[in-house]
Image (cartoon, rainbow, N blue to C red):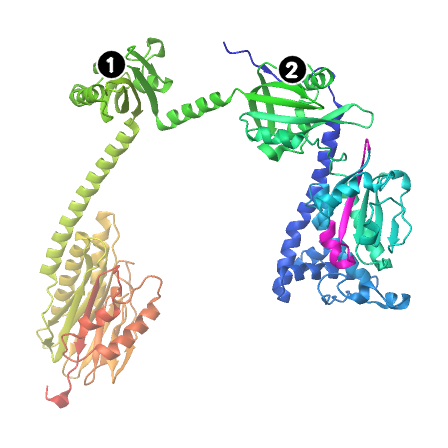
Amino acid sequence: MTPREEPLQPQAGSESPALAKVVARQRAEIVDLRRVAALLPVLERAKGAVMVQEGCSAEEAYDLLLERSVSADRTLVEECWLTLGAIRPLRGRRGRRRRRPQPVSGGSAFSSEQYLVPADPAAQAAAPGSAREATLLLGRLGLGLATVRDRPALAHCLLDHLSGGAGIEAVLVWTASDDGMRLTGHAGIDAVEAARWDGPDAGGRSPGDPGRGHKPVWVEGSEGREAYDVPEGAGRRWPARAWLPVEAGGEVDEVIAVLRGTDRPFTPVERELLVGAVQLCAGRMATLDSAPPRRDPSVESVQQILDALSGSVILLAPLHGPDGTLEDFRIEAAAPESVDVAGRRGRGLVGLRVLECYPTFAGTELWEGYREVLATGKPFASGPFTYEEVVAGIPHHSSYSLRVSRLGHHLVVSWTRHDLADRQERRLSAVQRLGNLGWADWNLVTDTITWSPHVFTIFDRDEGLGPMRLEDLPESVLPEDLPQLTAAAQRLLRDGTAIDQPFRITTSRGVRHLRIVAEAVTDVDGTPLEVHGFFQDLSGLRDAELALLSSERAVSAQRGQLQAERRVAARLQQALLPLPTGPVRLAGLWSNALYHPAERGISVGGDWYSAIELPDGDALFVIGDVMGHGISAVATMAQLRFTAKGMIVTGSSLTDALTRLNALLMHLNSPSGTHTTATLIVARYRPADRVLTWAQAGHLPPLLVRDGRARTVERPAGILLGATDSPVFGEATLRLQDDDQLLFFTDGLIERPGQDLRTGLQELATTAEALLRTADADSLPALHAALAVAEHRDDVCALHLSVPSQRAGD
């Protein structure tokens, strides 16, 4: 029987002063941490800017920022923002900008002996930058103190920063407690020496007695008068000593002592530096535990025992206020599996307070149980309860029961968590839901079957009916899948062979595609005793596979249709646009043509050319490009090609032929609902005087190579066909000379992704100057190969005309 879990509730009137103190201390820590967190990002950015500007290291950049802030009487934050350019530079009283300070030479503060031991007061006053260097050191110390967590770390931080600047060799920290002043932190001495300072050898009057006053005490020289008792021999080892009270709220509860192994007296600058350092420590020490750790010698032995235990077990020491009331408990030892709501575990909990780990614990029934056990020694055991904590705005609920016993002046608390199994169950349920699967167990000895809840969902079965027996399973399985499923089940039950078998079942919602994966647990003879496995619903995956298969079939059919269209279009184009096998002589000119289809896709384009000799001995040359691809483009190309030839042969002028071709294309566009355009050049060559007359409709100009130099021929007026009902076309003439090379081409020859036509024309001209030759059958293929790219986006058509030299006797 599972005990009833009660939520953890605070008792009436349980506004504990202890909880209020914890909240106040944590608020102070938050304020301090926020201040540091606000400074550090700006400081790091400013350091990076200085490193780039000055070419120095990170440490040098930090020193330079501090030195600048001190020299200009600004805070470090202001100097950082000023460096980053986020605020205007501060101005002096007379409105002038302060001169930028120069970097401090010599490295860290007080590195020069003249600043430490001036020859006389005048020299001290004249020592340049000594006070400034002290301020720099205090700035670095302030940042270092922001990261300390206890008094030992604070002592080490002080020693690290004061050893170079003031020659300090050891730092001791005393804190007031119920039994006098206790040494709570030290640096520069070992544990044996620390025990002498904290033990009877320190004298009846403890160092740092609060009644000694609020002023620092400076002891200089081995024979100097002692204001506080010190261990025997300490005066000779540490001739120069300073006792610096830490004042907070008008009271002195702590004292910091700094020790130096030389008998040199403290200079005024050093004294001011040390007093300033202790003032910095006062604010940080206020956020640390006020009571020094009073660790029982047996605590370490308890920690060693807890290290070997499982479960959550902690050792608590009571913490009393000044009036003797119980305020809190400090965790002295913790087992490895002990954990708080923030996720801290084991020894990471040591030194923390209970109300820091569980802030809402104060004033509850369990808290009163702690107090009762501490007072009476009678053990306390709680029933299961629910504990709620809000971490990062998210509520966390956990179920616990605990037992509390007293051990000397300590408490031993063991926690038992009851919700781990529930959490695992929730995770398993989520996995089954997300994976659309559920587990099933068969006990073949007792003939019992167990299903997880999601298996009932998969089979669309009411949980009240219980799991389906093996002999009832065939009623739901499709008949065509039953033989394979039966054979797999027989292998599993007879030989214990694991199976992974798909099958289908019928439900009220239709057919479902399932999968069973199972293995058997056998006895020593190999006889199966139990079967463990899972069912998985693959219906969604199967639907996706069928959809993908249907899509692939549709794509395949479309591809076949397009390939068939390409074959038809290619045959039609070959019939309409036969290419010569080499140069052809027409009206005294050598002509050669090239056609190269686009390599991308399976469509055929509308690029075309025509070169014929007219009845009067002239020659007609036409090249065009119809927009689009496929059979429609080829059909339009055929109409334009034959119509242009027919009109020129029957005596139409070039511009009149273009006008009529535009009308034809506009007529073809009207009934179909689609709009097609085309570009075209039509040229007539008269061999008697070698004059070429030509007109164009939005086509690229031809390229003329003469005397080894290539240039494009200026185009007459003309707009592409199909663009307007009233186009205007003009004619131009070109007189050809011996060895001239004239190239007509479509835009596919020079178009490149991301490149303008002007650049393409320039590349064509450069290549043509080197490759175009008279009556050379390889000129056009070589030109195309030189200009070709890896992927053609359009068809390429070119017509090359060569003027033979009359001197050669042609």
| Secondary structure under the numbered disc 1 in the rendered image | helix
Residue at 76% x, 59% y is: 165
| The C terminus: image quadrant | bottom left
Residue 344 lies, with reference to residue 648, above or below; the image says above
Residue at 18% x, 43% y is: 556
- Disc with the residue nearer the chain's start (1 vs 2): 2
Q: Residues within 10 Å of mark 1 (few under 14, many from 20)?
A: few
Depth check: 708 or 282 in front?
A: 282
Depth check: 166 or 646 in front?
A: 166
Residue 670 position within the rendered picture, expressed as x and y whole percent measured from the top left: 24, 50
Residue that numbered label 2 is attached to: 380
Residue 20 shown in magenta: no
Residue 391 position within the rendered picture, expressed as x and y whole percent measured from the top left: 59, 31
Question: Dividing the picture into quarters, in which one does residue 432 lie?
Answer: top left
| Secondary structure under the numbered disc 2 in the rendered image | strand
Q: Is residue 264 left or right of residue 9?
A: right
Residue 353 position within the rendered picture, expressed as x and y whole percent measured from the top left: 68, 30
Residue 159 shown in magenta: yes
Residue that numbered label 1 is attached to: 470
Q: Identify the magenta region.
A: 158-179
Question: Dividing the picture into quarters, in which one does residue 636 lie?
Answer: bottom left
Q: Amino acid at mark 2?
A: Phe
Q: Amino acid at mark 1?
A: Leu
Question: Dividing the picture into quarters, in which one does residue 598 lie?
Answer: bottom left
Residue 765 lies, with reference to residue 724, above or below; the image says below
